[in-house]
Image (tube, rainbow, N blue to C red):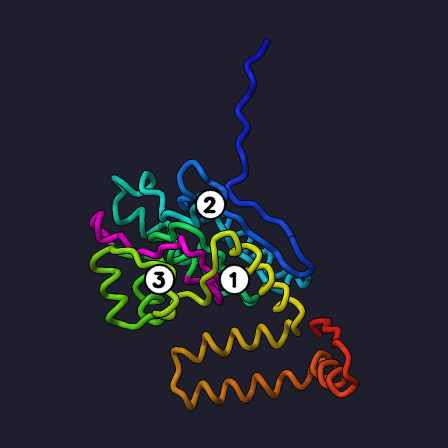
Amino acid sequence: MEPAKAMTLPTLLLDFPLAHVARLTLNRPEVSNALSLELQAQLSARFTELSNDPEVRCIVLTGSEKVFAAGGDISSMAGVGPIEILQRHTERVWAPIQHCPKPVIAAVCGYAYGGGCELAMHADIIIAGRSAKFCQPEIRIGIMPGIGGTQRLVRAIGKAKAMQMALTGKPISAEYACIAGLVSEVVDDAQVAETALEQARVIAQMPPLAAEQIKEVMLAGMDASLDAALAMERKANALLFASQDQKEGMQAFLEKRRPEFKGM
């Protein structure tokens, strides 16, 4: 009798829990959802697919009830030289997450450390459980954040707090992260998944063209002058008046009924 073969479970799960909502679940529990090169490649591929899927209007990104992601996979970095690190081109791997046009909600319980914190910061909304902790501990192993940790963190919480996190490697609580501006909302751990899905449901019922324009203009405007950002806002708003959803939304308002948005 042949010995039973060990089954390899997928490291990234995809399901569609609600209409127009996709959910990606990190699934490496044996290593606290460490972001291996394989898992990063899968995230890149899935975000590319979902970005181009007209049926998807919102994406929820989550880990387990005990950990979001404990960081990069150190075993894949120890002993590696700078040229190999450079040639991994993580900026290309993570680009589909960074440039995803659909609203992204991160549902975070437990540790979001290092690359896990950087992954969460790619989301547009972060729902955190009370157990959640956010940290950029790279300095403690002789390196620094390399997937946007120094740049997104300072934009989210300001220089003083970002410097403290990056230079000490000290984690911050969900409550502190919310006060600082890194997290959108803090709820009990048992309510994180439900809260994230409820917000995704609300967003998925909105006109997707408007949602995408809001996200694009907000992100682009952060690094522009106020005048330039306001000009982008005016033109994006005017563009939406060419959509069928704008006609439907205003007509439904006047007729006191629920609108049916088609993304057109």
Q: Secondary structure at mark 2?
A: helix
> In the rendered structure, does residue 76 fall within the stretch colored magenta?
no
Callout in the foreground (1, 2): 1
Q: Which residue is label 1 attached to?
A: 105
Q: Amino acid at mark 2?
A: Leu
Q: Which residue is label 2 attached to?
A: 39
The label on residue 148 is: 3
Q: Amino acid at mark 1?
A: Ile
Callout in the foreground (1, 3): 1
Indicate whether 227 appears above or below 245.
below
Q: Secondary structure at mark 3?
A: loop
> In the rendered structure, does residue 141 fall within the stretch colored magenta?
yes
Q: Amino acid at mark 3?
A: Gly
Q: Nearer the viewer, residue 173 or 47?
A: 173
Distance between the alpha carbons at the discs numbered 1 and 3: 18 Å
Q: Residue at x 76, y 85 (%)?
A: 251
208 vs 78, left or right, is: right
Q: Please provide percent x and percent y for residue 138.
A: 26, 52
Name the image quarter holding residue 54. bottom right
Indicate whether 7 appears above or below 242.
above
Name the image quarter holding residue 74. top left
For marks 1 and 3, the one nearer the N-term is: 1
Name the image quarter holding residue 199. bottom right
Q: How many residues crowd around disc 1 within 10 Å: few (fewer than 14), some, or many (20 or more)?
A: many
134 vs 260, left or right, is: left
Distance between the alpha carbons at the discs numbered 1 and 2: 19 Å
Q: Please provide percent x and percent y for residue 180.
A: 34, 69
Q: Nearer the viewer, residue 124 or 191?
A: 191
Q: Residue at x 63, y 74 (%)?
A: 209
For marks 2 and 3, the one nearer the N-term is: 2
Distance between the alpha carbons at the discs numbered 2 and 3: 18 Å
Q: How many residues crowd around disc 3 within 10 Å: few (fewer than 14), some, or many (20 or more)?
A: some
